[in-house]
Image: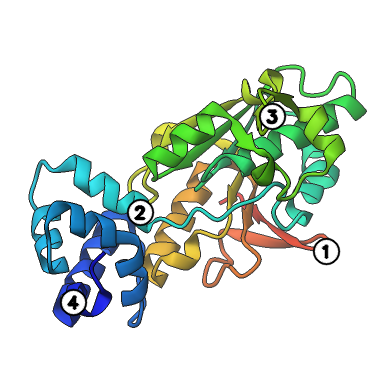
Amino acid sequence: MLSSTNAITPNGYLRFRRFLQKACGISLGDNKQYLVASRLGRTLEREGFTKIEQLVDVLEREGNHRLREEVINAMTTNETLWFRDLHPFTILKNKILPEMTRAPLRVWSAASSTGQEAYSISMVIEEFKGLRPGVLKAGERIVATDICTNILQHAKQGEYDSLAIARGLGDDAQRKYFDKLNGSTWKIKTHLSSRVDFKHLNLIDSFSSLGKFDIIFCRNVLIYFNVELKLDILKRMHASLNPGGYLFLGGSEALSGLSSLFEIVQCHPGIVYKAKIL
């Protein structure tokens, strides 16, 4: 495999940073050459490129969708687990779902990765309906989006090995929510997956076609965008929320400069942002 010192030149890295931000909004730092080299080294080698400038030349041409998709998939971080950070799901179950009387309930899991967040939301809804028979009679839909096409395909299948399931789920939940396919592979139960629709989406593009939502989970993705793009996405998410709808962000993310659009709801522990009615 090519070394970073050979392939990732300063000028090439600068050009690649510009391409990546324009293509999907990801803003690489000044010293992430090692990350580019580790994630794209095999692609450069396979394509016969000795410098990343050669890759950027091809990416900037129209029509090479396969390579463009491959590069974006490789550079997208897909770190996730079941019930990540836990408190957003506790807030969803104990505070937000009891408030939701409109029908049908619509939830958006943005940057859903391999599906753990969307399916965790579905599990919470299932538990809530079990505790409150007769609620949500009109049904509920979860729209899960991601920019990474191969990750979406994995998520749609809803199949996970034992190691992936163990990242956030205990044995009881595993038996309750999954069917065993073979010795090490488990599949999410149909009644949980049937309320989830996976769609390909780049957050820098318009998402108005997704419709309106009561709840949006946009966690641990805005940290990869610059301030201007982050604010643009959050403003458009506000427009995608029904009046009084809720937005969840990641633990290290915060709203700044958007107090006119959202109010902070302290939940002890954790916070959620409620869309103001303009």
Of badges 3 and 2, nearer the viewer stands: 3
- Mark 3 or mark 2, earlier in chain: 2
Q: CA distance from mark 4 to mark 2?
A: 20 Å
Q: Amino acid at mark 3?
A: Gly
Q: CA distance from mark 1 to mark 2?
A: 35 Å
Say whether marks 4 and 3 touch (CB < 8 Å): no
Q: CA distance from mark 4 to mark 3?
A: 44 Å
Q: Which residue is mark 2?
A: 74
Q: Is residue 154 left or right of residue 21?
A: right
Mark 2 closeness class: few <14, some 14–19, many ≥20 residues within 10 Å: some
Q: Nearer the viewer, residue 107 or 178?
A: 178
Residue 164 in sight in this render:
yes
Q: Which residue is mark 1?
A: 269
Q: Residue 192: percent from the left, percent from the top?
A: 69, 25
Q: CA distance from mark 3 to mark 2?
A: 29 Å
Vertical side of 194 occupied by 229: above or below = below
Q: Is residue 204 left or right of residue 108?
A: left
Which of the numbered marks, if any, corresponds to residue 183? Answer: 3
- Mark 4 or mark 3, earlier in chain: 4
